[in-house]
Image (tube, helix red, strand yellow):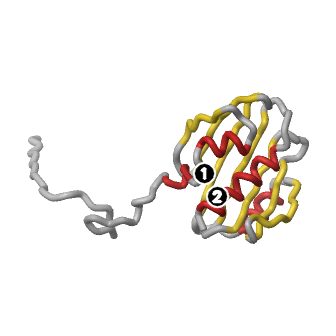
Amino acid sequence: MAVAGCSSTVTGTPVAEGGSEGSAEFDKLLQECVAVPDDQIAESVRADMVEQYFYGAVCMWTGSGPTGTVDVTFAWFENNSLGRERALAEELDYAIEPVTVSGAGAFLSRRPGDPTSCGITAAYTGTITWWVQYRDGGADPCAGATRLAELTMQRNQ
């Protein structure tokens, strides 16, 4: 049995299905990671400095300072709702506290038995969430997360 092969050359620029050449649909991909500059993140969580180590749908930093090591996470989901995020937090048995951030509806959430971490989720063209965890304790993680949410809302209005 003989197998015959064939080949051809296709010219042009590849375009995703449903897209068009020069589409700006993803022109701001990963820019959500700069919603708040690193120096303001560090100041907000009382760290001497932070270093970003993950870019993607979720952005992550680690820092250190007088409060020890701190982990910071940011997520912006454009097609999400505050109600959906709150329902998920309640499913996980997180302690929920309704708050407002720059006039927008929001809530603080804490994991059961974990006073070293806190997240805040706010309504903003979908939802934004900042999560702060002090590995060694030493500071109020909700204060840092809230300040980061405020800065995000102020900068992006």
Camera-side residue: 130 or 95?
Answer: 130
Residue 76 position in % (x across, y down) = 61, 58
Mark 1 / mark 2, whichever is N-terminal: 1
Marks 2 and 1: in contact by CB < 8 Å?
yes
Badge 2, how many Cα within 10 Å: few under 14, some, many 20+?
many
What's the residue at 60%, 51% (across, down)?
Answer: 36
Q: Which mark is residue 50?
A: none
What's the residue at 40%, 66% (across, down)?
Answer: 25
Element marked by disc 1:
loop
Check the image and report above or below for 92 versus 25: above
Residue 33 position in % (x across, y down) = 55, 50
Residue 31 position in % (x across, y down) = 49, 54
Quadrant of the drawing holding the N terminus: top left
Name the residue carrying label 1.
Answer: 36
What's the residue at 80%, 62% (across, down)?
Answer: 107
What's the residue at 54%, 55% (across, down)?
Answer: 32
Residue type pointed to by label 1: Val
Check the image and report above or below for 141 versus 127: above
